[in-house]
Image (cartoon, helix red, strand yellow):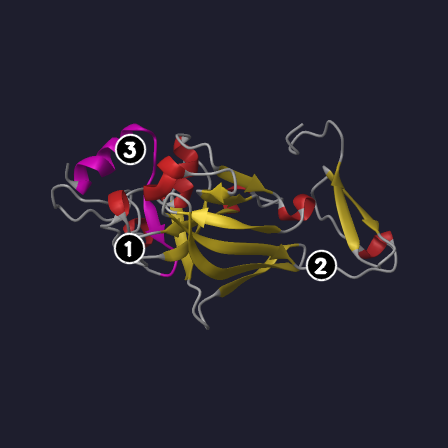
Amino acid sequence: MALNQLHEIGHNMDLHHSGDASASGNAYDYGDTTCIMGYGDGEDDTNKCFNGAKMAEIGWYDNVVSFNPVLDGDFDGKLIGVADYANVADEHALVLEVINPISSNENIFIAYNRKKGINSGTGEMPDMVTIVRASFTLESRLFGALDENDGTNSLTIEDFFNGRDLYIFVDNKGTDAGDVDYVSVRVELQVEDCTSISDCSVGTNNCVTATCNSNNKCEYSTVAGCCGNGE
């Protein structure tokens, strides 16, 4: 089936376009060619899949990991490509969704764009970790890609939460049992120093409280029963 047809089927599943945040014009809306919902190529039997945001939105996959870096601490794990999903293990994540505590329109989806099998026709950034901003039922925007090579193995998202930066690192690649290719990824939120609770800001999020621990670092927790924290 041609990619253009798959693109239209995606719309029938209520998926919106996949654009490139660094581009302008039509490419801003369609420029993520790692994804079916970006530009089509008009070719038959194109081997290309969805980006991380769309895979999470579709809901077909179990190994989509969502975490809030303010409340859940750091993430350190293995991402796999969609072509290896049949052999996925508990230690693997297909997509990492980083919850933005302030705006759900700015959630971040991290995926391994492994050029292999059903994704061997990816249009760009083969075998790299792609980073997309999106909210379900809205268009997604590709804004970064990382590899294990020096100079492209980390990304800083400034002022992710109350002046604190978010750091995304790509470490080593490898292969697990069943020929499952993976890449190791770490996500860390900048830690705040404090001498009292007043140094630990939670912004406008009333579902989060802060404390200043014995190591003079801010720690956060949820407010029980508060709308918005998943309870």
Q: Is residue 77 visible?
A: yes
| Amino acid beneath label 2 | Val
Instruction: State which mark lies toward you, 1 or 2.
Output: 2
Q: Total marks drawn?
A: 3
- Pick the front one: 158 or 116: 116
Q: Which mark is residue 11?
A: 3
Residue mark closest to the camera, 3 vs 2: 2
Side of 12 relative to 207 (left or right) = left
Q: Which residue is mark 2?
A: 191
The boundaries of the magenta stretch are 3-22
Residue at 79%, 61% in the rendered image: 193
Dot 2 falls on a residue whose secondary structure is loop
Residue 52 falls left or right of residue 125: right
Q: Is residue 21 magenta?
A: yes
What residue does disc 1 label? 27
Q: Earlier in the sequence, mark 1 or mark 3?
A: 3
Tell me which label, 1 or 2, sits earlier in the chain.
Answer: 1
Give the quadrant of the C terminus.
top right
Q: Amino acid at mark 1?
A: Ala
Element assignment for label 1: helix
Give the answer, above or below, for where 91 lies relative to 62.
Answer: below
